[in-house]
Each structure stands twice: as C-alpha cells, then as structure tokens.
Image (tube, helix red, strand yellow):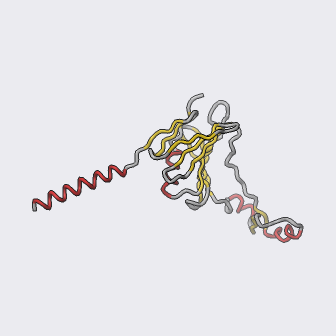
C-alpha cells in the first residue's frame, strides 16, 4: 500500500512539472511606434518600408505576420461588385470576360451581406482606439487582419495581417491584436 501511494505521488509530481513546462509564456515585442504581446517563441523581423514603417513577426510554425504603419497604409474597404445574373450573357457577348465576376439574382443583397467575401469583418476597441478586424470565414483560408484608421495626431494608419494560418495560431494572433499599444507621438 505504501509503495502505491509513493508511486502515485511521484507520478503526480512528474505530471505537474510537465504541465508547467508546456505553459506558454508571453513576451512584449517593442517596435518603434508600438508594442505587442506575443508567445515567447515568436520572433521580430525587420523589413524596410518605402513610405512607412514596416516589419513583422514570425511564429513558431514559420507563419509571417506583417505590419505597415504610415499615411498610405491600405484600408480594409473591400467591396466586391455583384452583378445581376441577367447581365451575364449580355456582357459575355460584348466581349467582357465574366470568369472573375460575381453574378446573383439578388445582387444588392449579396453585396451588402458580403456573400462572396472570404472574410468576415467587425469593429473592436483596442487600448481606446477603434479598430476594424478581418477574419477568414474558414480558419486557414483567408486573411486575418487588424486595421486602425488613425493612431496619432498625424492621422497615420496601421495594419497588421497574416494569411492562411492554422487554428492554433489564428487564436494566438487575435489575442496578440488585443495587446497592441501605440507609443505617444
């Protein structure tokens, strides 16, 4: 009986230590204009920007998360035009390539609902700044992005994004987005 108790305590101790080792601790990555908290295995990378501050982060699985900060950062303002299905044959006969066009019986409704988009969009507030977040409809197939329209008195914009990442990193990136903190001017 004594051996069973000692063995059980030994196995419990080893199990707890293994769990402690599996815990992922985080670190803060400091960039020139902002900081972000990420898993400690992720690494900062430097990228030269032409008219903006650019850079990135590489995850443990070698996924790259890029950022761009400046006046000319592209917005999240995709609107996919949807045409009425009745126009398809007319356009084709006129010589237009319709292969990459979207057609629908209810084009206005489908455009408003983003039916043909690969991502969903929502607004959030991060450290008292409004942000627009883009998440793929299907994790692993699409862009995961955060966009701030104005982060300072100079109206600089900021975006950070990655594409086609797995479920685990998808949620880690979303969690990291919540920790973005811009430094004062």
Residue 71 place in picture, x, y as percent = 70, 37
Rendered image quadrant of residue 120:
bottom right
Give the residue furthest to the top: 185
Rendered image quadrant of residue 74:
top right
Question: In the image, what residue occupies the spot 60% across and 46% down?
Answer: 66
Tell me: 73 left or right of 101: left
Residue 54 place in picture, x, y as percent = 63, 40
User: Could you say which is closer to the camera, residue 167 or residue 84?
Assistant: 167
User: Could you say which is closer to the camera, residue 21 or residue 104?
Assistant: 21
Tell me: 50 left or right of 5: right
Tell me: 3 left or right of 140: left
Question: In the image, what residue occupies the spot 37% across and 49% down?
Answer: 23
The C terminus, quarter of image: top right
Residue 16 place in picture, x, y as percent = 28, 52
Question: Is 174 drawn above or below residue 27 in the view shown?
Answer: below
The N terminus, quarter of image: bottom left
Give the residue furthest to the right: 94
Rendered image quadrant of residue 83:
bottom right
Residue 82 place in picture, x, y as percent = 75, 62
Tally of marks: 0
Question: In the image, what residue occupies the spot 57% across and 29% down?
Answer: 184
Give the residue furthest to the left: 1
Question: In the image, what residue occupies the spot 57% across and 48% down?
Answer: 65
């Amino acid at each position: 009986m004594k051996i069973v108790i000692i063995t059980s305590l030994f196995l419990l101790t080893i199990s707890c230590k293994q769990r402690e080792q599996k815990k992922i601790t985080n670190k803060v990555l400091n960039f020139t204009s902002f900081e972000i908290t990420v898993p400690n295995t992720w690494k900062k990378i430097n990228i030269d920007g032409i008219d903006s501050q650019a850079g990135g982060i590489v995850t443990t699985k070698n996924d790259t998360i890029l950022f761009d900060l400046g006046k000319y950062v592209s917005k999240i303002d995709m609107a996919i035009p949807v045409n009425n299905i009745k126009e398809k044959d007319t356009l084709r006969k006129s010589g237009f390539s319709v292969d990459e066009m979207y057609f629908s019986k209810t084009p206005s409704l489908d455009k408003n609902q983003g039916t043909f988009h690969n991502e969903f969009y929502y607004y959030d507030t991060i450290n008292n700044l409004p942000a627009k977040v883009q998440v793929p409809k299907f994790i692993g197939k699409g862009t995961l992005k955060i966009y701030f329209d104005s982060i300072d008195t100079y109206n600089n914009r900021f975006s950070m994004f990655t594409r086609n990442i797995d479920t685990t990193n998808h949620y880690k990136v979303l969690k990291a987005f919540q920790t973005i903190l811009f430094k004062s001017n």
